[in-house]
Image (cartoon, rainbow, N blue to C red):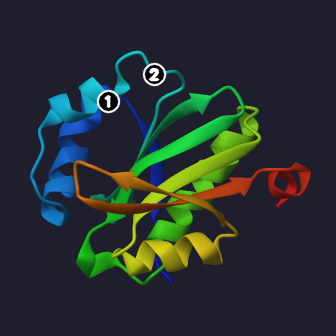
Amino acid sequence: MASAKIDIVSLSDAPVIIDIYNQMFRPTRDVEFIRRRYLGRYNELMLIASLDERPVGFFLGFELKPSVYFSWLFGVLPEFRRVGIATQLMDAVHLWVAEHGYASIRVECQNQHRPILHMAIDQGYDVTGIRWDPDRGHNLVIFEKSLGEREIDE
């Protein structure tokens, strides 16, 4: 298992996140994509995972409602997958979210992204629903994980 360095970053680091994002997803995006999504949001969290000083993954999230944190986007570059980096990112997110008093964290995932579906289940998330995404033309699976006292102590 790789040992990634996980850093909390700010919007000034958004170009690094967008670079990683654009290597994985289509359509490509620019920094304004993040800025627009964060407008009016509370408790935004941006993380970058690095190996040997090279950024290889990221996480973006924000408060959905006072008790629920929303995992908006995250990913790890394909050549660095399956070595534990996504798990390390999510462990850091769970700790931060619990420390900030949220009761649960929500993730929405496209049904065809099987590795994310498996990771959510492995991380203890429960399927809480499905919603139609008209922009993408297919369903999103909604996962939620309770962050009770046991999670904070682990």
At x 34%, y 18%, the residue is 39
Q: Position of residue 135 (x, y in %)?
A: 22, 48
Q: Are marks 2 and 1 in contact (CB under 8 Å)?
A: yes
Q: Which residue is mark 1?
A: 37
Q: Quadrant of residue 52?
A: bottom left
Is residue 77 visible in this depiction of the protein?
yes
At x 23%, y 56%, the residue is 136
Tell me the amino acid under the disc marked 2. Answer: Arg
- Asked if 66 appears above or below 27 in the picture, the reply is above
Q: Which residue is mark 2?
A: 41
Query: Nearest the camera: 125 or 76?
Result: 125
Q: CA distance from mark 2 to mark 1?
A: 8 Å
Helix, strand, or loop for circle 1?
Answer: helix
At x 72%, y 36%, the residue is 102
Query: Nearest the camera: 43 or 13?
Result: 43
At x 90%, y 50%, the residue is 149
Is residue 48 visible in this depiction of the protein?
no
